[in-house]
Image (tube, grey):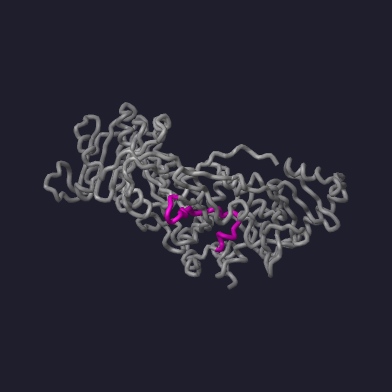
Amino acid sequence: MNSGVRQDNRFILQKIDDVSTLDLTALRTTLPFKKLLVPPKFSLFHFDSKGYATDFSTLQKRVIFGLHPCDIKALLIMDEFHAKEFKDPYYYERRNRTVIIGLSCLPDDKCFCNATGNETVTEGFDLFLTDLGEYFLVWVGSSRGDDLVRECPKLTDANVGHEDLKKYMQWQKHRSRQFKMDIDLTAMPEIVELSYDSHVWEQEGKKCLSCGACTIVCPTCPCYTVLDEAELVKMEGERVRRWDSCMFREYSMVAGGHNFREARSERLRLRFIHKLQSFVGKFGKPACVGCGRCLDTCPVGIDILSMVKHLQGEEVRA
Amino acid sequence: MSHAVQIKNPYLPEAMRLIRRNPLTEDVHFFQVRAVDMERALSLDYSPGQFMMVSIPGIGEAPFSISSTPSRPGLLEFGIRRVGRITDAIFKLKENSLIGVRGPYGNGFPIDNMTGHNLIIVMGGLGAIPLRSLLFYALDNRDHFNNIYLLYGAKRPAEMLFRKEFLNLREREDLKCLLTVDKDDTGKWPCYTGLVTNLFRHVTDFDPQKTTVVVIGPPVMYKFVIAEILKLNIPKHQILMSLERRMKCGVGKCGHCILGGYIYTCLEGPVFSYWDVMNMKGLI
């Protein structure tokens, strides 16, 4: 089982053997669940003189415990992305072996899933637990989830009454009052479209370090690069897939050295056009789920919130 | 937990044999490749304008336009310019060695929409590689198209790819073959000299509404050629081009070829219309 665990002032998603290390108050983990479904670096296949071979047999079944609604919405985006056109076997061989148990949360000052329309989830999990104080309200989201509940009948009570629902409603109201972030994504696709030539890209591009931290922590960023790692003497090795970032300089560079996105401002613009404009056109919702990770991570304060404010023409606190 | 049947793995290359190679110019070579299994080689289908991912294990993988036509099955042909690590390794391959190939990928040219049209093929530089596929496809299916024009501009005769092949095409009566070089340093060049844009004055007598132009060349060529094409009143969605981008997967996942904010060149391209290019910004 993998779950949020406290480490210094952060939470990390890691394998737990002892349930007592599990932290039910864990909010956003530094790296999102994607690290378990498409690891930062893994072998696509082994090659040698005989040919190419992939081995999925060593992949283990596991449970990811404690995903919050924003992460589950991101998981649904990743599921769809990796299924379309060419189904990605590396993602799905891991995904099909993974049980998702969601957990309710109370937002902190960087959460804005309410603004991206992701404050509640009705799918994408096997079980979802809402913490109502003395007990949890358990949503069963899949046949696998149903099996899990039936496996431990002593833990659950199938009789959900009016009082329970009332409590649940009160809890939801209480939660929605906790959001502190002032962000409004109304008409963002149009604003981004009309801001293609805005000075904002250049101005923020000057600050950007091209470190790629924003894409690494983003739960909906799937980009990767591929490299061959070969033995020195014999013709044998691994073709390796590693997380990549559209913030890196080489991202759009072709053989011969021409770079379609040489300037940092161009790469920054690509990221925000993708998250806030084009993705909406394609899927009807932004590729930002409001988890707040980029706000927590960017060393120079470029994030969804600050960019949205800039594009809307408002002052941004330094 | 029950586990689904293994998903087909689109990342695994298929071993193919390099049958023949010869130089087209100093740094561009021609490679003929065939699937090891003959049945597979003959059934491998693709469209003009598509590309394949070619692998050298231990070095890496990169996308290459297919230069052969599906109307002549059995062989896959590529024109490859030596430009980096992977092409260096490909240039070191001897005939009869095995290489990894997967694909075909990309949309290819919208042949169905072009059927019955006049076809104007405009090539410059390496653009001749993917357009050779379309040209021979059209010539092999000659009754599907109305007039066919080939306009090719190279810097010097020695830099014209498929030079002999194209010079021979001048004899055909069902094709207007217009070849030009910027400068004839041999004194023996039998065709036009000057820029490819000058050739458009020989493209006459056609209905622009029923015409498709396909233009592929170096970025500098597009601006001037498209200005000429627009003068001919050909609709913007019937002006087609093919874009080059960095690609690591070919299957819409790695992200490097992304255009606009969510157009994967490897899935929705590499062939785009001039309208797409105007609409999406930053494409050429």
Q: Position of residue B45 (x, y in %)?
A: 42, 33
Q: Quadrant of residue B100?
A: top left
Asked whether residue A108 is drawn in magenta, I would say no
Residue that lies at the very extreme toward the front in this rendered image:
A233
Q: Is residue B112 left or right of residue A1?
A: left
On screen, residue A111 above or below A154: below
Please state the extent of the stretch shown in magenta in the rendering. Answer: A213-235
Q: Is residue A267 left or right of residue B70?
A: right
Q: Is residue A27 left or right of residue B102?
A: right
Residue that lies at the very extreme toward the top in this rendered image:
B143
Q: Position of residue B268 (x, y in %)?
A: 46, 43
Residue occupying image coordinates x 70% and y 51%: A63
Q: Position of residue A225 (x, y in %)?
A: 49, 54
Closer to the camera in the image, B229 or A7:
A7
Q: Quadrant of the C terminus of chain A?
A: bottom right
Closer to the camera in the image, A19 or A6:
A19
On screen, residue A288 above or below B272: below
Residue A34, visible in the rendered structure = yes
Residue B246, visible in the rendered structure = no
Asked whether residue A220 is drawn in magenta, I would say yes
The count of marks equals 0
Closer to the camera in the image, B244 or B42:
B42
Residue that lies at the very extreme toward the bottom in this rendered image:
A318
Q: Position of residue B265 (x, y in %)?
A: 45, 47
